[in-house]
Amino acid sequence: MKTNLTQAFASFSEHWSPRIAADLNGQQLKLVKFQGAFDWHFHEHEDELFLVHRGSFTMEFRDKRVELHAGEFLVVPRGIEHRPVAEHEVEVLLFEPASTLNTGNITSARTVPAPKRVAT
């Protein structure tokens, strides 16, 4: 199914609330908007790919920081503690196994156990 990313991101406004845009081979493409700092966490069994659609953010690790801008992506390997931080609103595509919980090894007010689907 064809999807326009700009329109898909425009269909929601909540921060830190990923939306499922597509499923393929046990993986999901999720869209998320965020601003500010997320919770420190890791994913025991899943790698995550963060692809910036609009804006920029910093992926913080305990030993370094990686700046990401529109058109750039980063893979966070399973087991690596991280937290995304954005000074201004950013739009990000996430590629990850369908089983991936957004807060990984922790449960917090930001945990989204059953993400909604993007309105098409």
Image (spheres, grey):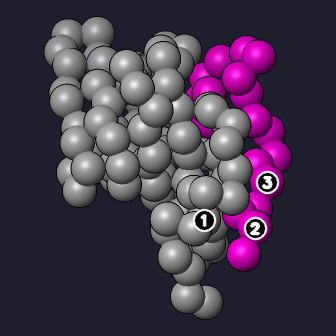
- The amino acid at mark 1 is Ala
In this view, the residue in front, 5 or 61, is: 5
Q: Residues within 10 Å of mark 3 (few under 14, many from 20)?
A: few
Q: Residues within 10 Å of mark 2 (few under 14, many from 20)?
A: few
Give me the residue at 62% from left, 32% from top.
Answer: 16
Q: Are marks 2 and 1 in contact (CB under 8 Å)?
A: yes
* Residue 30 appearing in the image: no
Name the image quarter holding the N terminus: bottom right
Q: Is residue 26 left or right of residue 14?
A: left
Give the Cα separation between the discs numbered 1 and 3: 13 Å
The residue lying furthest to the bottom in this view is 1
* Residue 66 appearing in the image: yes
- The amino acid at mark 2 is Ala
Element at label 3: strand
In this view, the residue in front, 111 or 14, is: 14
Give me the residue at 69% from left, 58% from top.
Answer: 11
In this view, the residue in front, 21 or 33, is: 33
Give the image location of residue 38, x and y in percent: 52, 19
Give me the residue at 19% from left, 27% from top.
Answer: 66
**86 within the magenta span:** no
- Provide the residue designation for mark 3: 116
Which label's residue is closer to the chain start, 1 or 3? 1
